[in-house]
Image (cartoon, rainbow, N blue to C red):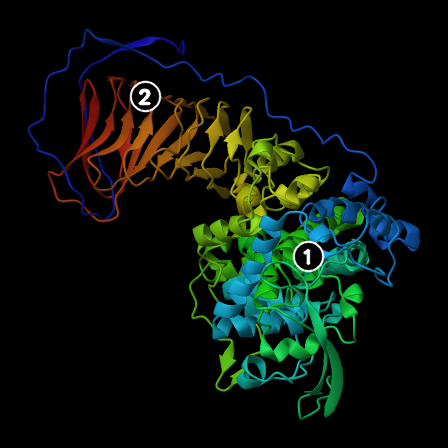
């Protein structure tokens, strides 16, 4: 049949059995206007799109970039390489801090050392961008002044517990199961809430060695190995060299106007916990001397004794990038890659640990941003190695097998099992702090964590409008970060996803990072942000996981065409405006919002177009071929599918589903269009008996 042929309208009433339960609003039962059968309807042409797929070029860079190639210099045994911004690729990608604050000289940054700088510039010369430097410290003052009790306790825990263990609670309802099966643990002694929240002389235990990630021979040992790769064994993950190169001040050394005022020093008698354990043996007291500064930043009291000791200690205590944030983000990225069903939540948990460093009063937003840049480089560096890639595949298989079996036993999909509702545990246990991770739903509001993650990418810094709107920059190797989350896409497609979801240019630090600082992993996990080329998606349901079903939750723009092939299901949930049209060749393409399909023609050659939207699905033109079907989750909208142009449905199947059984005689307008060509060959609705009637511009379902 010619895809552009005309079809002559004719009346038809077709009754079939269909089942379900639903109460819905119908329309009057007397709308049976006669049809003018002399009118012909032109079948919409197959969308052609742009005719090419998006290609994201590699950035044009020079040594020591690309970072993925020269990241190893960050761990070089040659100090002239490791401590030089001219050779250390990670430090070079972090050098944007110099556009806000640069208290050391270019000469020092080219040949730094672990001794720290001999001197600093005066404040007037060190503060390069006073607007954003002031915003940076004001943010710390605000959150440390207004933190809640629970937020202060979490900041304490994220400081003292191993980062490998602390971010395990990103597993949400599966947290305790993961910890038990992997062997992840903490052995810090339990403090009282008073010791954390009010005691200024408490000297808490701390641990962050690799052992707290768990046992590589455990049931989930392959996941533990990913943490080892990212933090210890493959990636050059230390923040020591960049800290010395940039030697920035911690926020508790800074006045609210951004200047530094050292007023002297003090000696504090810090007190260890009273009772020793097999793992933590220190008791008694220890005198510690600290520099004192004029500041409005309020450190969590139980962490005051964790400040750098000594006088004139700033030169050995660089804040940028935050080491704790880098460590926590790396562990979270390892877990996210290993268990993609909670990819976004675990990535966000890494961001939450960064926020904890600010809430604690130990770091500022610039430190957290710099650490995120480094963590992404380190994780990608590991995943781009043969060993790291193989370990990544093994880790994914381990979680899918372990948690998949439990999901099957519960009669749930793995995604639903990973997002089941539980009763949140507590950071408190009576008058004491609960130091153990616990099951929770803290990070399961997807829209909320997505918005917060984006906000933390820039922390409200002022954007330079003259530098905004520049082309996307996707660094070499970054696509590896999404492989487990979007296994059905190619590397080039994953690069396009990163390009179309990254944060805009014009923000300090981010623009100088080879693109690493602009990567928004939570948004990228939600699929394309734009079809700047045609997108061909093949999903094989038999492979399980996101191959079987995935959700693209971004608002998709662009002029490209989407083609869905393979037996899996792709769900579009955004307010989409892409104009190249959509083609369904096989499997299921689900419209979960009224504008999910953009503004182009939707052509269903095979498989199924599923409609499950609040409000009528708006389409420009619709063709459903005889080998394909249209399925509609019926609701009380007056119209389910509204086509501006023509709809052509000759010989296709129609499936209707109801949440509750409608009353006999209830009528639903399933489809409206300028003109409708042809009739559905069949209609099925389970146990509910339905008949269809056709008018020139609508298809009506009547409950028998």
- With 6 as the anchor, is 607 left or right in this view? right
Q: Is residue 397 visible?
A: no
Does dot 1 land on a helix, a strand or a loop?
helix
Q: Residue at x 52, y 64 (%)?
A: 143
* Quadrant the C terminus occupies: top left
Q: Residue at x 45, y 70 (%)?
A: 424
Task: Point out residue 330 in the picture as x, y percentages from the top left corner.
Answer: 68, 57
Does dot 2 land on a helix, a strand or a loop?
loop
Task: Point out residue 89 in the picture as x, y percentages from the top left corner.
Answer: 80, 45
Q: Residue at x 28, y 24 (%)?
A: 680
Q: Nearer the viewer, residue 193 or 497?
A: 193
Q: Quadrant location of residue 276?
A: bottom right
Task: State the mark number for residue 330.
Answer: 1
Does residue 679 sit above or below 206 in this rendering? above
Q: Nearer the viewer, residue 95 or 563?
A: 95
- With 325 as the anchor, is 442 left or right in this view? left
Q: Is residue 381 visible?
A: yes
Task: Point out residue 348 in the picture as x, y percentages from the top left corner.
Answer: 56, 55
Between tags 2 and 1, which lies in front?
Answer: 1
- With 130 as the anchor, is 93 left or right in this view? right
Q: Nearer the viewer, residue 9 or 395?
A: 395
Q: Which residue is mark 2?
A: 651
Q: Nearer the viewer, residue 262 or 471?
A: 262
Task: Point out residue 170 in the picture as x, y percentages from the top left corner.
Answer: 56, 62
| Sequence-first disc among 2 and 1 | 1
Q: Quadrant location of residue 181?
A: bottom right
Task: State the mark number for residue 502.
Answer: none
């Amino acid at each position: 049949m010619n895809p552009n042929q005309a079809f002559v309208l004719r009346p038809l009433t077709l009754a079939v059995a269909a089942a379900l339960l639903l109460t819905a609003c119908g329309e009057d039962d007397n709308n049976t206007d006669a049809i003018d059968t002399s009118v012909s309807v032109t079948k919409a042409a197959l969308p052609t799109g742009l005719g090419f797929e998006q290609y994201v070029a590699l950035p044009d860079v020079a040594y020591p970039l690309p970072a993925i190639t020269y990241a190893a210099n960050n761990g070089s045994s040659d100090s002239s390489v490791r401590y030089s911004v001219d050779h250390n690729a990670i430090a070079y990608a972090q050098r944007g801090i110099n556009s806000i604050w640069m208290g050391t000289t270019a000469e020092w940054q080219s040949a730094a050392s672990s001794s720290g700088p001999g001197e600093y510039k005066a404040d007037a010369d060190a503060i390069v961008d006073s607007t954003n430097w002031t915003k940076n410290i004001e943010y710390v003052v605000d959150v440390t002044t207004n933190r809640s009790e629970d937020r202060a306790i979490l900041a304490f825990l994220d400081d003292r517990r191993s980062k490998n263990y602390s971010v395990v609670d990103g597993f949400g309802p599966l947290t305790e199961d993961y910890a038990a099966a992997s062997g992840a643990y903490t052995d810090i002694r339990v403090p009282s809430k008073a010791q954390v929240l009010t005691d200024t002389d408490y000297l808490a235990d701390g641990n962050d060695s690799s052992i707290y990630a768990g046992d590589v021979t455990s049931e989930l040992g392959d996941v533990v190995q990913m943490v080892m790769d990212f933090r210890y064994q493959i990636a050059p993950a230390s923040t020591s060299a960049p800290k010395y190169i940039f030697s920035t001040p911690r926020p508790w050394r800074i006045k609210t106007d951004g200047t530094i005022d050292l007023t002297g020093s003090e000696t504090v008698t810090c007190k260890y916990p009273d009772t020793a354990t097999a793992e933590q043996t220190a008791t008694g007291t220890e005198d510690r001397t600290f520099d004192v500064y004029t500041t409005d930043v309020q450190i969590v009291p139980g962490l005051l004794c964790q400040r750098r000791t000594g006088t004139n200690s700033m030169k050995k205590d660089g804040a940028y990038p935050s080491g704790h944030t880098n460590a926590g983000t790396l562990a979270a990225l390892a877990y996210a890659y290993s268990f993609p069903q909670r990819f976004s939540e675990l990535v966000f948990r890494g961001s939450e640990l960064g926020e904890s460093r600010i809430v604690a009063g130990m770091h500022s937003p610039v430190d957290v941003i710099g650490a995120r840049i480094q963590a992404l480089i380190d994780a990608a560096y590991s995943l781009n190695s043969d060993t790291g890639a193989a370990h990544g595949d093994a880790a994914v298989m381990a979680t899918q097998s372990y948690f998949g079996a439990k999901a099957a036993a519960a009669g749930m999909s793995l995604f639903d099992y990973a997002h089941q509702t539980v009763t949140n545990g507590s950071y408190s246990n009576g008058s004491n702090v609960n130091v153990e991770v616990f099951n929770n739903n803290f990070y399961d509001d997807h829209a909320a964590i997505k918005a917060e993650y984006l906000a933390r990418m820039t922390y409200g810094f002022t954007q330079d409008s003259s530098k905004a709107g520049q082309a996307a920059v996707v660094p070499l190797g970054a696509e590896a970060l999404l492989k487990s989350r979007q296994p059905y896409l190619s590397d080039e497609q994953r690069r396009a996803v990163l390009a179309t979801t990254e944060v805009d240019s014009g923000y300090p630090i981010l623009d100088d990072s080879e693109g690493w600082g602009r990567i928004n992993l939570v948004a990228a996990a939600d699929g394309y942000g734009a079809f700047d080329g045609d997108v061909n998606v093949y999903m094989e349901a038999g492979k399980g996981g996101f191959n079987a079903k995935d959700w693209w939750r971004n608002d998709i723009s662009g002029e490209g065409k989407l083609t869905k092939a393979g037996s899996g299901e792709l769900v579009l949930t955004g307010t989409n405006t892409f104009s190249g049209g959509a083609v369904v060749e096989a499997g299921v393409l689900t419209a979960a919002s009224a504008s999910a399909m953009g503004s182009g023609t939707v052509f269903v050659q095979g498989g199924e177009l599923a409609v499950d939207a609040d409000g009528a699905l708006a389409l420009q033109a619709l063709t459903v071929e005889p080998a394909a079907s249209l399925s509609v989750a019926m609701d009380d909208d007056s119209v389910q599918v509204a086509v501006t142009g023509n709809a052509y449905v000759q010989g296709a199947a129609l499936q209707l589903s109801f949440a509750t059984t409608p009353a006999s005689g209830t009528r639903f307008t399933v489809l409206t269009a300028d003109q409708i060509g042809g009739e559905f060959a069949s209609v099925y609705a389970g146990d509910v008996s339905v008949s269809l009637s056709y008018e020139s511009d609508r298809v009506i379902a009547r409950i028998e």
